[in-house]
Amino acid sequence: MVPEAEVQDVLAELQRLRARVPLLAGALAASTDGLVLAQDTPGVEAEGVAALTAASLGVALRMAEATGRGGFRELLVRGETGYIATYAAGSSAVLTLLAEDRINVGRLHLEGRRASTRIGEMVDAALQRTAQPAPASNAPRPRTPPPGGPLPHRT
């Protein structure tokens, strides 16, 4: 999973995004398998939104593949009272934005794409660091004889 320092950086990015886009009602970064990484979604159950994002991502991936449109980039859903926009964020995360109906959709996409790129870079870098094995110590290990003296030999 993503270390706490990067989670705080992702949360700060979500908060800056919400400050830049006034009609943005919520922002959530999640893993592609539906686990919340960071969220700024007042009044919304973040875990449920993350799980539904993963489910819709699966359908969107299949749809893009079946129609020959390439890899997943973004998904936009318009409801009666607003929008839900999901953007790919690196190789293993997504950004989901909740917006009011009066939002400028072009601005939503512009800001969402920029934020998803930054979040994707943060998450991918953190996952890459945690996946690398710890560096081996160059200090020589002391050689200790096996307990009880030398191993017996059969003759």
Image (cartoon, helix red, strand yellow):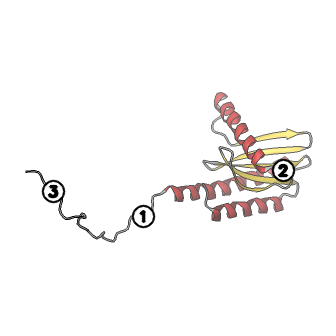
Which one is earlier in the sequence, the residue at label 3 or at label 1? 1
Of circles 3 and 1, the one toward us is 3
Residue 148, percent across and down? 22, 64
Q: CA gap, disc 3 to disc 1?
A: 37 Å
**Neighbour tally class for label 2: few under 14, some 14-19, many 20 plus, Cα within 10 Å:** few
Element carrying mark 1: loop
Locate residue 140: give its quadrant: bottom left
Residue at image point 67% right, 28% down: 67
Amino acid type, label 2: Val
Residue 137, percent across and down? 37, 68
Name above or below for residue 63 compared with residue 85: above
Q: Nearer the viewer, residue 37 or 57?
A: 37
Element carrying mark 3: loop
Residue at the farthest top position = 66
Residue that badge 3 annotates: 152
Residue at image point 77% right, 54% down: 111
Going by the image, does 62 lie left or right of 134?
right
**Neighbour tally class for label 3: few under 14, some 14-19, many 20 plus, Cα within 10 Å:** few
Going by the image, does 107 lie left or right of 116?
right
Residue 64, percent across and down? 67, 33
Which one is earlier in the sequence, the residue at label 3 or at label 2? 2
Element carrying mark 2: loop
Q: Quadrant of the N terminus?
A: bottom right
Residue that badge 1 annotates: 135
Of circles 3 and 2, the one toward us is 3
Residue that badge 2 annotates: 44
Q: CA gap, disc 3 to disc 2?
A: 70 Å
Amino acid type, label 3: Pro
Amino acid type, label 1: Pro
Q: Nearer the viewer, residue 103 or 57?
A: 57
Name above or below for residue 25 compared with residue 149: above
Residue at the farthest front position = 148
